[in-house]
């Protein structure tokens, strides 16, 4: 993968969280991490040399903790969420992760103990990536800075003027359902917490409000505006980075979905797809399935992408979640029923052929016979004589044809999940 922190982990032969914790207690290892992070004051963004269909994960989903929480449990949930929404559609996902800039900012903005704690969480995330086998699925990249001072200019330069035009309505929406609490006055500014249903994590805005101000609406507006600016500036960073890397952008937060509600893309529809039979697959199993399923997996993805293109082209002003629901109802559902009907018909014909031959004897057990079809033969069918054997051969020929259907991969996942219950 060639990522700097993974290289440092390998150099120190760190494979487990306990080894990482022990190494970070050693001042030499922590110093080496911080020295490497702060050695480069500049960075560059060049088009990615990645495989096939690659998407850039936006802040909030890019494993950097920049729009979320640095705790390892939260980072692990972010990774699980990212993998669950991408493994069955994309060839690779570009993430920021604990880049040199991210770690350098931790060193500049916190005590050394807090910086060590956060770096440990980020590096544990890297160990988890290896644990689930996602190392080759992810591509690490730096991102353009998220500038809160010049965010208006950068939004305009990135072609996101509509966000500025809609800023008042978005701030009003944040105010309406947002909650401000935990006030900490500091002379000419105020610290507080801000929560909202669109936010995955509690925000801690620093408000340019004098401590003497007591009007709750003034404070709530300042907090909502601060949250808007924070997310808008990070969105600008994502868009600029995606343009420079030559990749599409996959949004990572509810606020970003709201900011770009009228800018639909295949990638964000893919991230919005709610297919529990795929999105509920544990990350480690998902990575194994990608490697093992071969042709049926590729045919499924090709068909899904074609459906995405058609649905997005006909979507009008629909949100990504609505288009994703249409794809499930209009493309995936009918195709799954077609595969299921064909399989049931084939099984029924086989049952009729062997009905007179079922009796005393051994039961044929099929577990991946010749072409990896563990659930295709009805249980309890015994084989006697040439007629029955011919019927079985015909059954397998029909089954092989069914496996070539676009949605066979998804259908087989559903059947296997059904049998595990």
Image (tube, rainbow, N blue to C red):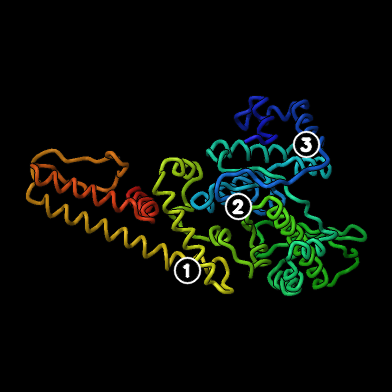
Residue 319 versus residue 392: which sits nearer the camera? Answer: 392
Q: To which residue does mark 1 refer?
A: 326
Mark closest to the chain's N terminus, 3 or 1: 3
Neighbour class for label 2 at 10 Å: few (<14), some, many (≥20)? many
Residue located beneath label 2 in the image: 55
Residue at the far right: name it: 187
Q: Residues within 10 Å of mark 1 (few under 14, many from 20)?
A: some
| Nearest to viewer (mark 2 / mark 1) | 2
**Is 103 on the left-hand or right-hand side of 48?**
right
Residue 292 to residue 301: above or below: above
Which residue lies at the image location 53% right of the left edge and 47% below the top edge?
A: 91
| Disc number for residue 359 | none
Q: Please provide percent x and percent y for residue 79.
A: 59, 47
328 with respect to 378 (left or right): right
Rendered view: 147 above or below 97:
below
Cα–Cα span, label 3 and label 1: 46 Å
- Cα distance, mark 2 to mark 3? 25 Å
Quarter residue 352 falls in:
bottom left
Q: How many marks?
A: 3
Indicate the secondary structure of the residue bearing disc 2. strand
User: Mark 3 highlights which residue?
Assistant: 37
Residue 77: image location, x then y, percent: 59, 48
Report helix, strand or loop for mark 3: helix
Left or right for 49, reference 356: right
Identified at 63% across, 58% down, the residue is 251
Give the image location of residue 23, x and y in percent: 70, 27
Q: Is residue 344 above or below residue 366?
A: below
């Amino acid at each position: 993968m060639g990522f700097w922190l993974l290289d440092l982990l390998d150099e120190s032969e760190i494979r487990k969280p306990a080894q990482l914790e022990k190494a970070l207690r050693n001042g030499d290892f922590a110093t080496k991490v911080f020295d490497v992070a702060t050695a480069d004051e500049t960075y560059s963004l060049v088009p990615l040399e990645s495989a096939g269909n690659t998407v850039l994960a936006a802040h909030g989903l890019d494993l950097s903790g920049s729009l979320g929480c640095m705790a390892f449990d939260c980072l692990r949930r972010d990774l699980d969420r990212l993998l669950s929404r991408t493994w069955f559609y994309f060839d690779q996902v570009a993430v920021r992760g604990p880049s040199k800039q991210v770690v350098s900012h931790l060193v500049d903005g916190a005590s050394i103990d807090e910086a060590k704690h956060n770096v440990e969480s980020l590096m544990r995330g890297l160990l988890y990536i290896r644990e689930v086998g996602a190392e080759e699925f992810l591509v690490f990249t730096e991102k353009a800075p998220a500038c809160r001072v010049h965010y208006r200019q950068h939004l305009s330069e990135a072609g996101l003027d509509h966000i500025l035009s809609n800023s008042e309505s978005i701030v009003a929406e944040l105010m309406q359902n947002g909650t401000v609490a935990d006030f900490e006055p500091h002379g000419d500014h105020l610290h507080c917490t801000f929560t909202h249903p669109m936010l995955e994590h509690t925000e801690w805005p620093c408000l340019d409000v004098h401590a003497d101000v007591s009007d709750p609406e003034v404070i709530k507006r300042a907090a909502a505006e601060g949250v808007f600016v924070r997310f808008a500036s990070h969105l600008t960073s994502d868009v600029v980075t995606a343009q420079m890397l030559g990749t599409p952008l996959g949004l990572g937060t509810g606020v970003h979905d709201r900011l770009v509600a009228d800018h639909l893309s295949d990638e964000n529809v893919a991230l919005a797809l709610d297919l529990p039979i795929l999105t509920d697959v544990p990350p480690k199993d998902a990575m194994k399935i990608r490697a093992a399923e071969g042709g049926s997996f590729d045919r499924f993805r090709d068909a899904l992408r074609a459906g995405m293109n058609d649905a997005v082209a006909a979507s009008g002003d629909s949100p990504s979640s609505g288009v994703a629901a249409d794809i499930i109802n209009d493309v995936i559902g009918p195709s799954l029923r077609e595969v299921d009907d064909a399989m049931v018909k084939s099984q029924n014909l086989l049952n009729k052929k062997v009905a007179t031959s079922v009796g005393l004897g051994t039961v044929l057990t099929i577990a991946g016979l010749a072409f990896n079809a563990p659930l295709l033969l009805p249980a309890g069918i015994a084989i006697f004589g040439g007629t029955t054997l011919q019927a079985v051969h015909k059954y397998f020929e029909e089954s092989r044809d069914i496996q070539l259907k676009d949605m066979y991969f998804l259908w087989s996942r559903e059947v296997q999940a059904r049998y595990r219950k």
